[in-house]
Amino acid sequence: MILRRILVLLSCVTLAASGLAVGGASTGSSPAVAAPHCVDVHVLFARGTAETAPPLGVTGIAFGNAVRDRLHGKSVRVEAVQYAASSDFTEKLKFAESFVKGVEYAQRRMMSIAATCPDTKIVLGGYSQGAALAGYTISSSIKIPAKYSEFDSYVPKPLPAEIAKHVAAVVEFGPPSKRFIREAGAPAITPQAAYRGKTARYCAQGDTICNGAPLGGPNALHLLYPVNGMMEQAANYVADRV
């Protein structure tokens, strides 16, 4: 109950501060509805598990605003990755299906942006489950456990290598740790080499999702990324690369 109250409070504070900034976000369900003009920077962000203020989520809204504030003089579009951000971990196959749809959406959008707006700098981001989604989106391969081998054909393929040159930065807030991923029975996240030097991971001290603690639910620290100063750090990271 306490965690829920904190999250609701953050939602109210962030939305109030964002004003009309969210109106500039492109949140269409397919590449065909993307804005007809190209921008300098296109942020593609995946929200966290059941995060409020969908489709971007509180963290995505805060990050988009921080990037806009930092990149005065540049046009910035913020778009949500369209996926369920499901909290139903009991139905593993159903959860995996919704997650894979998010990875595939992110990959399609990145390829579409690169093809139609080759001078646009892409920034891929995500929070919590969305951070894991961003990691799998740029993976060199996704190797599922042998007991699920019958579903191997559904595993997303790696992005074409040439897409990397269009990506300025990958930003992950509260990404599940390697231990968390392993204990959850999920495939290891192995980013393509081209993305390793342009990826920043932000983990608040004491955040049990990303600090290597045993598999479990989030604590209050995992909810504070919109207000703990890491948005500004991430915006500076992006600004240095676009």
Image (cartoon, rainbow, N blue to C red):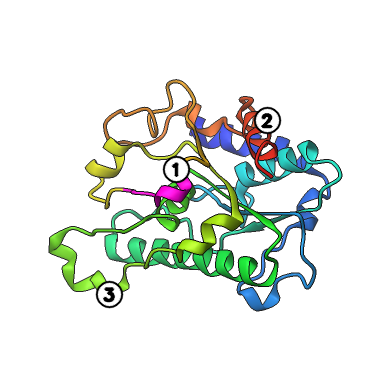
Which is more N-terminal, label 3 or label 2?
Answer: 3
| Residue 206 seen in render | yes
Q: Is residue 121 magenta?
A: no
Amino acid type indicated by mark 1: Arg
Q: How many angstroms separate mark 1 from mark 3 (CA)? A: 26 Å
Question: Could you say where residue 35 lies in the image, as x and y percent from the top left?
Answer: 76, 70
Question: Could you say where residue 223 lies in the image, as x and y percent from the top left?
Answer: 53, 33
The residue beneath circle 1 is: 196
Q: 61 or 159, which lies in front?
A: 159
Q: Secondary structure at mark 1?
A: helix
Direction left: furthest residue: 147
Q: Secondary structure at mark 2?
A: helix
| Number of disc labels | 3
Amino acid type indicated by mark 2: Glu
Q: Is residue 194 magenta?
A: yes
Task: Name above or below for residue 232 compared with residue 103.
Answer: above
| Residue 49 seen in render | no
Q: Residue at x 39, y 34 (%)?
A: 209
Which is more N-terminal, label 1 or label 2?
Answer: 1
Magenta-highlighted residues: 189-196
Question: Could you say where residue 92 lies in the image, as x and y percent from the top left?
Answer: 28, 60
Q: Residue at x 80, y 69 (%)?
A: 37
Which is more N-terminal, label 3 or label 1?
Answer: 3
> Of the numbered discs in the image, which one, if any, rests on residue 232?
2
Question: Could you say where residue 169 lies in the image, as x and y percent from the top left?
Answer: 58, 45
Task: Name above or below for residue 118 compared with residue 182.
Answer: below
Q: How many angstroms separate mark 2 from mark 3 (CA)? A: 40 Å
Q: Nearer the viewer, mark 2 or mark 1?
A: 1
The residue beneath circle 3 is: 153
User: Where is the C terminus found, in terms of image quarters?
Assistant: top right
